[in-house]
Amino acid sequence: MLNTLIFDLDGTLTDTDPVHYQAWKQLLAREGRNLSEEDFRRHISGRANDAVCKDLYPDKTPDEHTVIANEKEALLRELANTLEPTAGLETLLSYADQQGWKHAIVTNAPRANVHHMLKALGLENRFPLVVLGEELERSKPDPLPYTTALNTLEIQPRQALVFEDSIPGLTAAKAAGIVTVGITSTLTADELLAAGADLAIADFNDPRLWEMLKRTS
């Protein structure tokens, strides 16, 4: 039976992809480079910074990649002054509390970003477990962040439900054997379903999600 909800952060708990896009766009503009929304959506969204930097700056060293990533994340925090939770989130979390379910976050975002975003959302004390992919040996799309969450919570994949918005996140969750709901903040429902999502919804108010929750609880 379902007893745990696991959320990605960016694009899932809140729609931050437009802010990430602006941060990368401004950073690349310093070198006279352009970044289209389509290229961001297909090649950057949902990926860990080390992988993105290797693709965007192939001639730079790992240490230089770290500096670039830190600059980008600092810029993102400046841009993300106010954030709104995805519609229906508080209703979903309250329902989970009533059911006695656990909550967790599994994200590729850096620790400073996670703290900043959760505080901006008023959720800094809402998630007892936060798994940071960038601090593990492998981040999404590898399943390790999700298997780490399962092991820490001492649950089986069938007891969890994951919410993701990106292909790397979906790939990771499905590889860990977890039923996954795609959030259409960045990709279309068809794209999410093609990537393996068991259901694709715009927000947490979707009646199909609540039907799923009641069937599995």
Image: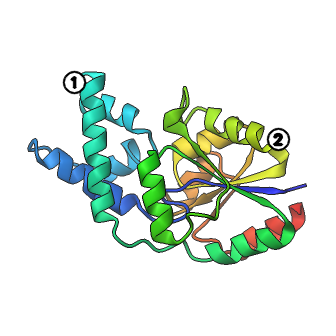
Where the C terminus falls, by quadrant? bottom right
Quarter location, residue 12: bottom right
Vertical placement of residue 203 versus 178, above or below: below
Q: Position of residue 163 (x, y in %)?
A: 64, 56
Q: Residue at x 63, y 32 (%)?
A: 144
Q: Which mark is residue 35?
A: none
Q: In terms of secondary structure, where does tag 1 sit?
A: loop
Snapshot quadrant of residue 207: bottom right
Is residue 130 at all visible to an observer of this figure? yes
User: Closer to the N terminus: mark 1 or mark 2?
Assistant: 1
Residue 60: which numbered mark, if any? 1
Disc 2 element: loop
* Residue at screen point 70% across, 72% down: 92
Query: x, y percentage for residue 14?
Result: 49, 66
The answer to whether 163 is drawn above or below residue 136 in the figure is: below
Quadrant containing the N terminus in the rendered view = bottom right
Q: Outermost residue, front direction?
A: 125
Kind of residue indicated by mark 1: Lys
| Rendered position, 206 above or below 200 | below
Q: Which residue type carries mark 2?
A: Glu
Q: Is residue 103 left or right of residue 119?
A: right
Q: Determine the image quadrant of residue 201.
A: bottom right
Q: Nearer the viewer, residue 154 or 195?
A: 154
Colouring rule applied to residues: rainbow
How many residues crowd mark 1 within 10 Å: few (<14), some (14–19), many (20+)? few
Circle nearer the viewer, 1 or 2: 2
Name the spot of residue 126 as percent of width and height, x first.
64, 64
| Residue found 14% across the figure and 44% down from its top | 33
Left or right position of 198 against 43: right
Q: Nearer the viewer, residue 143 or 96?
A: 96
